Amino acid sequence: MRTDLAVIGAGPAGLAAALAACARGVRVALVDAATEAGGQFYRQPAAGLRAGRPEALHHRWRTWERLRDGLAASAVRVLTDHHVWAVERGPDGFTVHALLGPEQEEPAEVHARAVILATGGYEQVLPFPGWTLPGVVTAGGAQAMLKGGLVVPGRRAVVAGSGPLLLPVATGLAAAGVEVAALVESTAPRRLAGHVPALAGKLAEGAGYAARLLRHRVPVLTRHTVVRAHGGGTMTPRTDGAPLRLTGVTVAALDGDGRVRPGTELHLPCDTLAVGHGMLPHTDLADGLGCRLDGLAVAVDAEQRTDVPGVWAAGEATGVGGAALALAEGHLAGRSAAARLRGTTPDPAPAAVKARTKLRRSAAALDSAYAPPAHWPEQVTDDTVICRCEEVTAGAVRDALDLGAGDERTVKLLTRAGMGWCQGRMCSTAVAGLAGCPPTPSRRPFARPVPLGVLARQHPQEGPS
């Protein structure tokens, strides 16, 4: 299909961008891999589940209702079940390449004059002994199960790691009837206290989560971390001697330098561990287009434009900052794209610009306060799997370092860490941590695996003339 503007990603940023552009007379196609719009933040349960009160699972539900109703009343063409694997720039615009449906085998293309990348982010999990046990899930994964499937991952859970996402996960699980044995946060409260001016707008939200944790009697262990996850079980006979699933975790206190304090270990029985250490921007499509990156995020100007003409970016792809910031950035990106496509200058949007400035300041403060423990690699034993796809252990990574590897790429060449199905999304930051180097964006030609048959059809070989 052909359109003026293709917005990739139907989360808060993409929805705001699509609605803003469409309201200014631009033909818009909103492309997303999910079956419904909303993204991860506004993930909806399937209609067949007949959820009676889906609003109980969501923060700022009224905002979602406004976006949903606005989308239904607009001329935006919504293309769900479209898994975008690349965006190709040509002389007449852009071609968005996607794979259709859950099988992701049939190709589809969207041709557009301009593109807005609202591709969101993904979770970061730092490895520890036992993190591959069944029953260990990401914090966002536990939340997705609850929001999208109306199911809980277990009966007794520990929510652990670092970052503001842990709060809604813990309170959501507790409200759904899960016994939350503890919320284990590696950050010390004093780190947040040092950013109070920038976080003033977040205080009420934080107080609300604190009240819910208290109401559900969830213990909160700050400046603590998971040392090891333990497994066992006899539900199904195993011939390889491997434990069946998670039975508990050991947590310990951290000192001021982020090291585990000996003698503070505490065992918490549980059948679920929801763990996460913040979010990372999705930049695969932007990188494929040649957009400049600022650290791990897509670099944009005041209009949310990238340095590639015709390409805008908004939301977590430009720096993780939450749904409210994504909405502001998406709105500005949509206004700018619509104006530029019409050959005019974007109208000022002082309220959105002011909100973006304020929310970016809050996001920077949260990012600084919730930094993972500095010495987490010291707790990773040699037999701990680092790259799950290729089953590369920490010992193998350390052997590569002894051979002279000093960065992620060299470790990858020597161990295959990062060469598997996820292409390093799960393990790249862990490899960088073990190597003692800062994480770097991965250079991937495609944003997801693509069947060879689909690639062969993109540029068919011409026959003899």
Image (cartoon, rainbow, N blue to C red):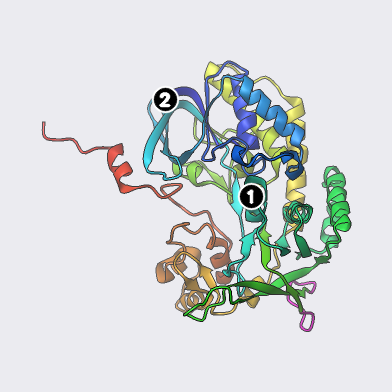
Q: Is residue 257 magenta?
A: yes
Work out how far the residue at label 1 is from the one at label 2, CA to CA, in angstroms.
31 Å
- Residue at the spot 67% in from the left edge and 19% down from the top edge: 347
Q: Is 274 situated above or below 205?
A: below
Q: How many marks?
A: 2
Residue 144 is labelled as: 1
Q: Nearer the viewer, mark 1 or mark 2?
A: 1
Q: Quadrant of the N terminus?
A: top left
- Tell me: residue 215, above or below residue 227: above
Q: Please report the bounds of the magenta region as a residue range.
A: 255-265
Residue beneath the point at 72% across and 39% down: 52
Q: Classify 109 as above or below 234.
A: above
- Of callouts 1 and 2, the N-terminal one: 2
Q: Secondary structure at mark 1?
A: helix
Residue appearing at x 57%, y 25% in the figure = 337
Task: Identify the residue under disc 2.
Answer: 1
Amino acid on which the number 2 mark rests in the picture: Met
Residue 465 sits above or below residue 388 on the image = above
Instruction: Quadrant for residue 264, please give it.
Output: bottom right
Q: Tell me if 64 is positioned left or right of 401 in this view.
A: right
| Quadrant of residue 250 within the rendered picture | bottom right
Task: Locate residue 293 relative to residue 227 in the image: left or right.
Answer: left
Label disc, if present, on residue 429 of the rendered structure:
none
Residue 303 shows up from this direction: no
Quarter of the rendering containing residue 215:
bottom right
Front position in the image: 202 or 243: 243
